[in-house]
Structure formats: C-alpha cells, structure tokens
Image (cartoon, grey):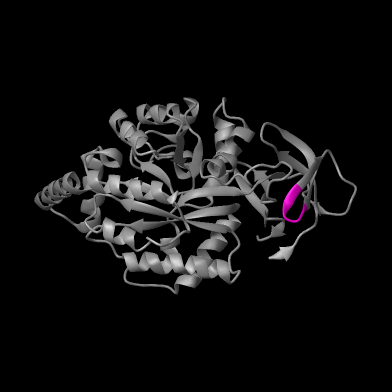
Amino acid sequence: MTATPGIFKNARLILPDTVEDGAISVEDGLISDISASSAAPGHDCEGDFLLPGLVELHTDHLEVHYAPRPKVRWNPVSAVQAHDAQIACAGITTVFDALRVGMDEDADLSAEDMRELADAIETGKAENRLRADHFIHLRCEVSAPDVMDAYSVFDDDDKIRLVSLMDHTPGQRQFVSLDAYKTYYQGKRGFSDEQMEAFIKARQERASSLAPENRKKISADAIARGIAIASHDDATLAHVGEAIDLSTKIAEFPTTLEAAKASHDARMSVLMGAPNVVRGGSHSGNVSARALAEAGCLDVLSSDYVPVSLIQAAFQLAEEVETVSLPKAVAMVTSTPAETIGLNDRGRIEPGRRADLVQVRLVGNVPIVRGVWREGRRVA
C-alpha cells in the first residue's frame, strides 16, 4: 500500500443523501472534513464520482482461486491474494469471504480445505499481504450430514462474523421448481430420469431428518458467540417466521416477493445478488432484485459470484428504478451492509468515518474503478 494525499478534490461526492461537487480531507485514515473545493495540493479526481469503499457480505469467489480445476489445489495464501486483488480492484474495501460448511456427496472440497483458507486469510492479514479488510462468513448447508462436524472446525475462531443457514434441498427455497433442479443435476451428473428421481427422494428425506435440528444448533451457537445470522433463499411466510424466531439479521436471496416483504417488515436487511441486477433477473427463475427494489424492500446487494457486479449494479439500479436515487443505491453496497453487520466506522463519506474510498468514472452503462483507498492508503 502506498501513502496517499490528505486531500481528494474535484470530485462528485456521493454523500448519504445527495451527490455534490466537492473535496474531502483525510487525516490518520479518517475523513476529517468535507468542503465545496480545495486549493491545496492533493489527489485530483478529475470530476469522477468518489464514493465509500464497497462492503461485500457474501462472496464465495475465493474457492475459484483455491480450486481452479477439479482435484487441483492452489497455494492457499496465493489464492487469497489473487481473490483479494480482484475484490479490491472491483472497489470492495471490506469483504466477508464465504466458506462452505457442510458438503454434498459430490463436493470437491472439504472442511479441511475451508480451514486452510480461513488460516490463509489470517496469514494474509498478519503479513500485510491484503488490500481489502477481510472477515469470515460461514455458509452452512444445514441438510448436509457433515455440517455440524465441519462447523466445529471453527469453534474457537473469533474471526467468524456471519453465518448463513442454507438448505438447497430440491422442491423448496431456491429449487421450488424441480425442473430447474433436474436440469442442473442431470447436466452435472449425467443422471437418467430414474436416477434423478432417486437422488431427489434421498435429498428430501435427508433434509427432513437433519435440517431443522442443525438450523437450531448453529443459530444458538452463533447467538452465544455474538455472530450475526443470515437466512438463505426464504420463499414463504413460514420460512420468514422461522428466521425471526432464530434472531436473523439478514435475509439472503429471498426467492419470492412475499418473503422479501415480510423479511423487510421484520427489520431484517434483505440482500440480493448484484448479478441478478446486472443480468436483469435470477438465473434460477426466482424473483428479480429489481422487483424488490421497485417494491421498496431491497436493502443490500452482494456480488455473490462476480466481484465486479457490485459497483455496476449500484449504478444500474439508480438508472433503472425511479424510486432508487444514486445515494440510495450506493448505500446498498456501502453503509447498509456495514451497519447491518455492526461495522459503524465505515460506509459513508462523512467526518469521523474511515477513509475507505473508491473513485469511479461512468462510461456508458459500465463504471470504471479508477482508484481505491483503504483507511486513506491507496490499494488499487
């Protein structure tokens, strides 16, 4: 990381409620002042947007760098560095790396792999290798037979800040449509129709016996350790009611408008995928993020599997949805995710907040990230 000037001037500042031409001053890694202009030497933003560093709560993109091919394992520290560089260059200065807990029988990764990646993240932080600020998010497949054993691998890890309770059993949540599930798995595994039916039945029976108890055990442990809880792929009012009972703070990727509205009304932060926004809809055929934004019940965006989608989705929502201003869209990728997870020191351009900043130029409908700073030091 290189030292940066104390002044950022000639910028279009995306503030909490407005967009204004101006300058900001930075001291000791914090924003110290906002002004209309500055004659002092500093970094000239050339009229570009200057917004807070993006806050990413759910990306499983690290696995792509660690296991780039079946049965191939990359050096975990090197994989974390590669992931981190891609994250930072997408304007993300705070990231919750989602690690899998509970594996399918055809999984190419294990709990030991996840532990290696968690350790590599800590090594990267300790050795000042990383550009972004990294936290750990455990995405727990509650219907998996090994989920509790895998979860126990992280028993003593105080770096865990978020757990999501996931269940990808066919016939519910993300896979309400069995047709979509069959298309995915028959393409992946080459099952005949008879094999596919047997596979679905086994998955459903397994979930009935395991998921409810595992969901309760993990949520109880998370509450005791002060770890935030996210639901995942809620589709019905019953799912939302269960999430409320488990003290859930974040509703990740609700699959219906009904579930999203109920979650929002229950004061959960409703999170949807930025790729959903950029692509114009869900790849699974579920409710679109734009529909939730138009209904006033979209709070947070996540890059999920495409890091660069986060900044693009914010500008796209502001352009396409009449009720979503640019400051409101930017809040979905900065202040709202930060404050939802208890990181109240970042996410806004205002005095006293961390100088996590992104300089963006909008060319056509695809924004260009031209500079990234974390605590006032340039990282990309």
Work out which residue is located at the far bottom of the displayed protein and give it: 75
Q: What stretch is highlighted in magenta?
A: 27-31
Work out which residue is located at the far right of the displayed protein and give it: 39
| Most common secondary structure along the magenta stretch | strand
Q: Which quadrant holds the N terminus?
A: bottom right
Q: Going by the image, does 336 lie left or right of 172?
A: right
Q: Report x, y in % for residue 64.
A: 42, 62
In the image shown, does 376 or 275 lie closer to the viewer?
376
Name which residue lies at 51% across and 62% down: 83
In the image shown, does 372 or 320 lie closer to the viewer?
372
Q: Is residue 80 magenta?
A: no
Q: Going by the image, does 203 lie left or right of 359?
A: left
In which quadrant of the rendered view does residue 239 lie?
Answer: top left
Q: Report x, y in % for residue 268.
A: 45, 34
In the image shown, does 311 or 374 lie closer to the viewer?
374
Name which residue lies at 16% across and 55% down: 191
In the image shown, does 68 or 236 lie closer to the viewer?
236
Q: Which quadrant holds the C terminus?
A: bottom right
Question: Is residue 103 in sight in this rendering?
Answer: no
Q: Going by the image, does 198 lie left or right of 344?
A: left
Name which residue lies at 46% across and 44% down: 275
Q: Report x, y in % for residue 3.
A: 75, 63
Measured along the vertical axis of the image, is residue 175 above or below residue 257? below
Name which residue lies at 59% across and 41% down: 335
Q: Does the magenta stretch include residue 29?
A: yes
In which quadrant of the rendered view does residue 66 lie?
Answer: bottom left
Q: How many marks?
A: 0
Work out which residue is located at the far front of the displayed protein and give it: 224
Q: Report x, y in % for residue 104.
A: 25, 57
Q: Going by the image, does 324 lie left or right of 27?
A: left
In which quadrant of the rendered view does residue 208 lie?
Answer: top left
